Amino acid sequence: MPLSTRRLILREPVFGDVSRIARYLAEPAVARMLASIPSPFTEAHASVLVGDLLTSNERGDALALAIARRRDPGTLMGLISFSKSGSMAEIGWWLGPRYWGRGFASEAAATMIDVAFCDVSLDRLSAGAFADNTASLRMQTRLGFRSAGQSQRFCVARGH
């Protein structure tokens, strides 16, 4: 189920994406903004991740898509997903650092928010970011998210 935006294709991840996923998620600047990934992150981790994402997509309890440029759909830039639990879902994303600051995450997230709310059983979508991830926090505000407070979250790459 590929989705298109002005500049992007959001497509299912494939095992051919493993090396790029591993490379980007092994970068400390990316890993420290994500709570649930192992650190250091290896190609073996990336392969398991792709398999898990495809399984969740198949089950229908989540939708995880690779972010790629329309002009180069085979080259993964990052991932975006939402996972459902009852009438709520949580959205998350990451991009390789070379793609930061150019609006790609906002473009992908706006599309995924629209897709999430096509599910009539969904009445709330949440997103989170570490307090020092000011770019993601600003982006969430621009996309219409409101702060619901702060909580502690463990991050392997941060060591706390």
Image (cartoon, helix red, strand yellow):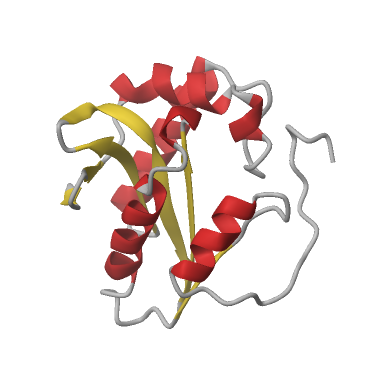
- Where is 33 relative to 126, above or below? above
The quarter holding residue 150 reads bottom right
Using the image as rendered, state which of residue 109 and residue 98 is in the foreground.
98
| Residue 17 in the figure: left or right of residue 157 | left
- Where is 98 relative to 10, above or below? above
Outermost residue, front direction? 102
Image coordinates for residue 100, horizontal then vertical, percent:
46, 38
Can residue 1 be seen by looking at this rendering? no
| Residue 128 in the figure: left or right of residue 23 | right
Image quarter in which the C terminus is found: top right
Image coordinates for residue 21, horizontal then vertical, percent:
44, 26
- Where is 20 relative to 66, above or below? above
> Which residue lies at the image location 57% right of the left edge and 77% below the top edge?
146
- Tally of numbered discs: 0
> Which residue lies at the image location 19% right of the left edge and 53% below the top edge?
5
Outermost residue, right direction? 160
Image coordinates for residue 87, horizontal then vertical, percent:
45, 79
> Which residue lies at the image location 33% right of the left edge and 52% below the top edge?
108
Image coordinates for residue 159, horizontal then vertical, percent:
83, 34
| Residue 70 in the figure: left or right of residue 82 | left
> Which residue lies at the image location 50% right of the left edge and 19% below the top edge?
23
